[in-house]
Image: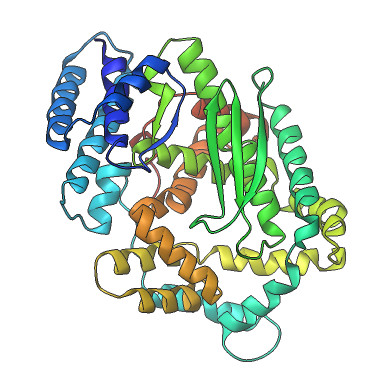
Amino acid sequence: MDIAESYVKLVLAVGRHDGDYVDAYYGPSEWKAEADSKVIGLPEIERRAQALLAEVADTSTLDPGRKAYLVGQLRALGARVQMLLGKRLSFDEEARALYDVTPPVNTERHFQDIVSRLDGTLPGSGPVSERYVSHRNEFVIPPAKLDGVFQAAIAAGRERTGRHIPLPPNESFVVEYVTDKPWSGYNWYQGAYRSVIQVNTSLPIYIDRAVDLACHEGYPGHHVYNALLERTLVRERGWLEFTVYPLFSPQSLIAEGTANYGIELALPDAERNAFEREVLFPLSGLPPSRVDEYYAIQALVRQLSYAGNEAARRYLDGEIDAAAATLWLERYALMAPTAARQRIRFFDKYRSYVVNYNLGQDLVRAYVEREAGPDPDRRWKVFADLLASPTPPSALSDGVA
């Protein structure tokens, strides 16, 4: 059995114990059938993973990038197995073990300073969080208009991505609207350049989420990332380890980081505002004259991105309970109570995975801009190369504080 096959079968074996672990699989059907036919105990999986890790580390025949990728993935697999066996890791320990990163720490004062700046920007009086939620509620996409708005945003992301990245032939995805999920959107990659993208409609969907979800889940985000990996690494190079995607692994830092950075790459602020004013606000029935007002406030709110990470750290480390974490998210992430409670569900299910979104985005942005400089075309080239490569998170970190 070669290294790639051994790795894939180990990931599938862990998936029998953890229903969230295997995010996508499109490899040989007989490997999946074998995994489904029996359950391998977690201690045995751990033993096999350590043996395979030693084999990968000792081999001199693997491409260096491929080797580094497999080492990182296998270390994370071992850590996840230990967690399933009952080992408790702190938020920071877990992020390092699973995603190959050390999350930054921010103080309550840091977030309070940003909230104070919003105090003078938001209309009305009273607590900033309540005023922000009230203001944002004026920019909800009506449910009857949601699909039209979302499809327009997808078309814009695809057109802009296609200018710079040759997409595989016949790539496509379908969009489904679902409810009662701990996430706002999800891409389920099917293989053969196809995805299913699900959008959670349990909570209000604000106008900014149209572009965010279309680009993050679709173009140039997860759908493009998975399609390029399939074309470049699986079909062209025969690296079958990429036919499986273990969610709790360093690969997710790259996946989520590129998906979030892809939003700003496809639609930089000025271009995005123009597109929203000319297309999305009219489609939503919202006043185009308020685009600049809305996104000026959103720019400040984006600076509170790490407030959610801090809530997760304190909650998962047992420093605060769910009620206190919910209040923290309302106060410093400016979430409505229902959205804050949904985010606690996300913490419970995915734990330190939250670092992949904002820290991943910051690492990818720094890497692309360091490698490409200010030239937009060059940035797209570096970004596309990153999507189609086995780059581990540690390779992105130089130059990021």
Name the residue rendered at 76%, 40% in the picture: 156
Between 374 and 334, the residue placed more toward the observer is 334
Q: Is residue 327 visible?
A: yes
Name the residue rendered at 24%, 42% in the picture: 80
Between 337 and 259, the residue placed more toward the observer is 337
Identity of the residue furthest to the bottom in this view: 126
Between 327 and 378, the residue placed more toward the observer is 327
Would you say 159 lies left or right of 401 here? right
Between 296 and 375, the residue placed more toward the observer is 296
Would you say 237 lies left or right of 115 here? left
Depicted 125 relative to depicted 72: above or below:
below
- Quadrant location of the N terminus? top left
Depicted 298 relative to depicted 108: above or below:
above
Would you say 188 lies left or right of 207 here? left
Depicted 212 relative to depicted 226: above or below:
below
Name the residue rendered at 75%, 73% in the picture: 138
Would you say 181 lies left or right of 120 here? left
Depicted 105 relative to depicted 146: above or below:
below
Location of residue 241 in the rendering, given as x and y in whole percent from the top left corner: 37, 20
Location of residue 260 in the rendering, given as x and y in whole percent from the top left corner: 55, 46
Location of residue 288 by image quarter: bottom right
Location of residue 330 in the rendering, given as x and y in whole percent from the top left corner: 49, 76
